[in-house]
Image: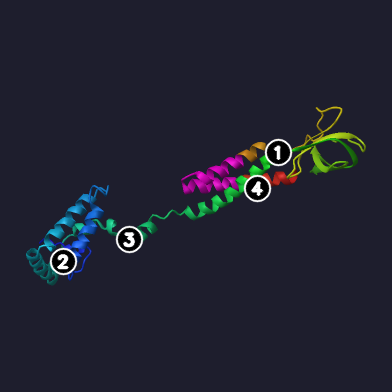
Amino acid sequence: MLKLKDYYKVLHLSSTASSEEIKKAYRKLALQFHPDKNPSSQAKAVFQEINEAYDVLSDPVKKNNYDFRLNQSFQSKASYSGEKSTTDSHRPFHKSPGKQKFKNKDPYKSYALKGKFFSSFVFFFCLILCIDYMISQRYDNTIVEDISHFEAKTSNYTDHFNHEIQSSKIDFNFNSETANSITPYDTISVDITPIFGIVKSCHPISDEKLNYADGFSIYYPFTFLILLAMAASCAALFVKSNETGFSLSILSMILFIIVQFLLAKS
């Protein structure tokens, strides 16, 4: 024996619903599942079932006959042994938006949002480094007043030399690969960045090709790390995939740590 369809359930109504409530529910569901408005492959079947339910419940004679049969089916245990109604097979359409949203929640979303915040910080920090490099200031004909030399050793091996210079125009320090011949009262020209104070060049006025500041710095030879950190952080801000965005944020964080280490050594 086939199970009698519960048309009240199809229209999301109770068995005591009035004719006005039946009409209102039908209009709402018909609009929701009309094939012209709902692109789902199951919308047509649901729409047909809604029309079938309304055709019976909107007609007083059909409704009385249906209510009688429905009450009889509730009293018979055999009516519960049949297969599920067509309406039950379309339950995904009737799930509340909140439950559906919870089911499809992206686990990387919260991490990606935090990653974007940090990536924006990395991007602007690297941007400042680039601006600092481009707007470096030059001090010509400055006289060396005092100079100190220090050897930076690694396992009894001299890695580089650090020089601290006081001059008539500016005090600065820089690294070099070898000990240089700068002495007090020498006249030199210095090209230095205004924000981080990194010396780009330091040479005697008699020979502009001789650069005393030939040691490593954040700008040389590691400029590519700054550009790579900017590219990774920028991509993390604009990529659509949360998982990819989070991975790029991790990459930009690692590059930022390396840049900070090199900046401290510069």
Of the two numbered discs 2 and 4 on the same chain, state the one appearing first in sequence. 2
Between disc 3 and disc 4, the foreground one is: 3
Of the two numbered discs 1 and 2 on the same chain, state the one appearing first in sequence. 2
For label 4, the SS is helix
Left of 95 or right of it: where is 106? Answer: right
Q: Which residue is mark 2?
A: 19
Of the two numbered discs 3 and 2 on the same chain, state the one appearing first in sequence. 2
Left of 4 or right of it: where is 229? Answer: right
* Residue for point 14% across, 57% down: 52
| Residue 75 highlighted magenta (yes or no) | no
In terms of secondary structure, what is the magenta stretch mainly?
helix
- Magenta stretch in the rendered image: 228-254
Q: Which residue is mark 1?
A: 133
For label 3, the SS is loop
In the image, what residue type sits under mark 1?
Tyr
The image position of residue 23, as x and y in percent, is 18, 62
Determine the CA span between mark 3 and mark 4.
Answer: 45 Å
Which dot marks residue 257? 4
Q: Which residue is mark 3?
A: 96
Q: Answer yes or no: do the residues labelled 1 and 2 have beta carbons within 8 Å?
A: no
- Would residue 32 be visible to someone looking at this image? yes
- Residue that lies at the very extreme toward the right in this rendered image: 185
Determine the CA span between mark 1 and mark 2.
Answer: 78 Å
The image position of residue 63, as x and y in percent, is 10, 65
Rendered image quadrant of residue 132: top right
In the image, what residue type sits under mark 2?
Ser
> What count of labels does the image hold?
4
